[in-house]
Image (cartoon, rainbow, N blue to C red):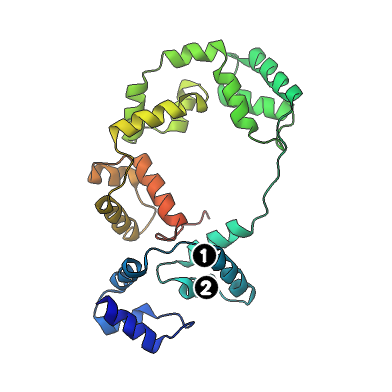
Amino acid sequence: MADRMTGFIKEHYPTPVPANYRAVSNYMWVHMDDCIRIHDMFKGGFKWTKDDYEQAVVLRAQGLTYKEIARRLSPSLSLETVMYTLRRHLRPKRVREPLSVEELKEISRLVDEYAGKYLVVDIIDKIRSQLNLDNRRNCNITIALRIAAHAHYKAKIRDIDFDDLAYRIATGQTSDGLAAKELDIPYPAMASRLKSLRAKLFSPVWTEEETRKLIDYARNCDSKPNCAYFSKVLGTKSPYQCNGKISRLRSTGVLPHIPNI
């Protein structure tokens, strides 16, 4: 079937003419999505390369639409994926200066002053604003780690039932960020521990069958995929893992990107 399809494409849509997979579908008497799936199986899922970026930039400069560029590159690409990838690729990168020794000392002093008086999220915002750290590299993480090292928050972290918390997060009852806010502790203080506990609850390795089911579900969704629902149906992966897998599949072009509007 793959040979028949590729032969039809070579005859009627020679390079660089993009193949019309609706016409291919009519010729093959196979649903268009299945034709695209055969293409992915035959050639492998689309992965962006430097040449693809450069070709897409040139085509965009020539006035082609995102949809036309997507058809030129791969039938499994959507216009949203091309639009998102080009915008991310062409977006200028911000250069941030590292924190100085003096700023680190001042952060520690302010953490001692604010610990227990304000919520953790407010402490981070207050210190960043007070010291004007918006142009400093990893300032939020640095402040959060300094807060986590404070005796007040070390005591709070020791009282957490991480096994129960990991289970609630893995089953979609809460999220890492919400749990950190509810417990009023810095997220980095629990991130690595929760990651290892979640790995014990659900294997981090995705099988081909699990991936295929996720792709089929995501492609047939009329709206944003419900990872909590799919996790219950699948039974072997958490909503957190399903959401991460969908993000990775979108970044590689296997699934279309849904832009934030």
Left or right of residue 191: residue 127: right
Amino acid at dot 2: Ile
- Residue 67 higher or lower than 145, as above or below: below
Q: Quadrant of residue 115?
A: top right
Residue at 50%, 23% in the rendered image: 189
- Residue nearest the observer in this picture, 232 or 166: 166
Q: Residue flagged by tag 1: what amino acid is it?
A: Val
Residue neighbourhood size for the residue with mark 2, other residues' Cα within 10 Å, grouped as few (<14), some (14–19), many (≥20): many
Question: Are dots 1 and 2 in contact, CB under 8 Å?
Answer: yes
Residue drawn where x is 26% and y is 81% of the image: 28
- The correct choice, above or below, for 135 with respect to 215 in the image is above
Residue 225 place in picture, x, y as percent: 36, 51
| Residue carrying label 2 | 69
The answer to which quarter of the image holds residue 127 is top right
Where residue 167 is drawn, which disc sits there?
none
Q: Is residue 154 left or right of residue 44?
A: right
Instruction: Look at the image and tell me whether residue 125 can be seen.
Output: yes
Instruction: Give the number of the disc on residue 82.
Output: 1
The secondary structure type at the circle numbered 1 is helix
The residue depicted at 29 percent of the width and 36 percent of the height is 202
Q: Is residue 187 visible?
A: no
